[in-house]
Amino acid sequence: MTTTTSPTTQPVPPTLSARRRWTVLAVCCLSMFLVGLDTTIVNVGLPAIGRGLDVGTRGLEWTVDAYTLVLASLLISSGALADRFGRRRVFQCGLVVFGAASLVCALAPSVGLLIVARAVQGVGASMLSPVALAIVVNAMPDPKERAQAIGVWASVFGLSMAAGPVTGGALLAGLDWRALFWINAPVIAAALLLSAVFVPESRARRARRLDLPGQVLLTMVLAAVVGVLIEGPRIGWTSPAALAGYAGAAVAAAGFVRVESRRPEPLMDLPLFGRPVFTGAVVGAVAVFVALNVTLLLNTLYLQHTRGWTPLAAGVATLPLALGATVCAPWSGRMVGRAGPRLPLLLAGGFITVGGLCLVRLTPHTSVLLLLAAYVLIGIGFGFANAPITNTAVNGLPPARAGVAGAITSTARQIGSALGIAIAGGLVTGTGPAGLAHASRPGWILVAACGVLLLLVAHVSRPKQATTGPAAPQAR
């Protein structure tokens, strides 16, 4: 048991036993499965939601991006709150908020309320993702064991992201779209119970102040960029409204840099981005999740609208992606623990690049075997990417900043998710079933480009990072 002496400091508790450490990992993985699943499970249900609430592609994009936008905006602040008030406490609060919002989503009578509830879901999810990783990092003091644990964590997260469409398709086969949100209830109940029993409380040795100006400006930047990408096809890319969006994003970004550079305890430590390894991890996280979300959304729309497949069939088509991610993520974690991040990043970039190139000539009659081959290649790349990116980002910050490390990495992921959905939706908005395959071709070029970017990131990664990196964080 940990005895707290003040909100900012506490004595170091005894090291957890191996069994307890891996139990803590399992509990955190359960919550991460929930967050990842909810990021993609809605994708396969978008056509059904559109029919049920009488909403078009733009409204459906906001249904997905309201969640990821709020999640990306609040992750760093949630990590700081957890470092101050207790990671288990914030983790459990996140579960409660996420669960309550899920119930509202399931009962929503209109797309407006659904979008609002999805945004509140994002608030709850922001208290889970970085906090879960911080709990895992603090429970694993040995660098090699921590790298393996991050590999498992990344595997579960990758599996949840890739398995979302399959789960969603299975639910829609027998129920309506509201079941996509009802399914969260038993997972949340189990996570609440297990976290109360097994997860120890921990805080940072020195808690940071909240940076409200930085938080507001970061939210404005992300909202402006994603908003323009979603609304651009409707309002016109050179319309006054779009130009105002560009200007707003630029001004908010400049204000964010100015404010953060002057605050003693900023939301985001901008000098960290002067470290090539850390910056590469963040850029790589964005690229991986742009590629994944472009793939999942284009897959859903193409197979259901152009090929006439059922939601279940479209979801099952992503099983090769899920299999590749599940098998390769723990393998990647072991590789990082032994030799560093460069090799798995090279493999990730190569597989994603080839997978995207397979579909740059997509037609309404493209071979199903080619589709499945592309999905398995992208899934393998996704599986290899997460462990080195996460481990590099965690080791790129001081040990006492585990919450911030997890938050920055998760923020990059969710920014990639939001951008991927907005870009993919923008490519096919207003396109009929016959023209959707051709309209989606730039999306597959983008997927391949994300793979090439990962290859570049691999060249700035130092293999010694995982084995001779900074001292492991102590359990707090």
Image (tube, rainbow, N blue to C red):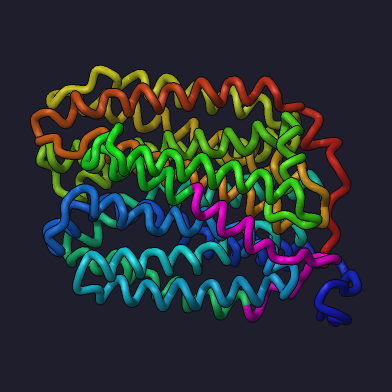
Q: Is residue 394 magenta?
A: no
Magenta stretch in the rendered image: 196-221
Residue 331 on image: x %, y %: 60, 37
* Residue 230 showing in the rendered view: yes
Q: Is 232 rendered above or below residue 83?
A: above
Residue pictured at 28% horizontal, 72% vertical: 106
Q: Position of residue 196 (x, y in %)?
A: 63, 80
The answer to which quarter of the image holds residue 210 is bottom right
Q: Locate the C terminus and report the quarter of the image it occupies.
A: bottom right
Residue at 53 percent across and 56 percent down: it is: 73
Q: Quadrant of the N terminus?
A: bottom right
> Does the image show residue 140?
no
- The picture quadrant where one finds residue 5 is bottom right
On the rendered structure, is 475 left or right of 76? right
Q: Going by the image, does 466 lie left or right of 61? A: right
> Which residue is more in the foreground, 36 or 415?
415
- Is residue 370 or residue 65 the one in the foreground? 65
Tell me how many marks there are: 0
Question: Is 202 a magenta residue?
Answer: yes
The answer to whether 76 is drawn above or below residue 329 in the figure is below
Residue at 84%, 81% in the rendered image? 4
Residue 329 appears left or right of 396: left
Percent across and percent down for residue 258 are: 68, 45
Instruction: Specify the farthest residue to the front.
Output: 240
Residue 253, x across and y down, in percent: 56, 43
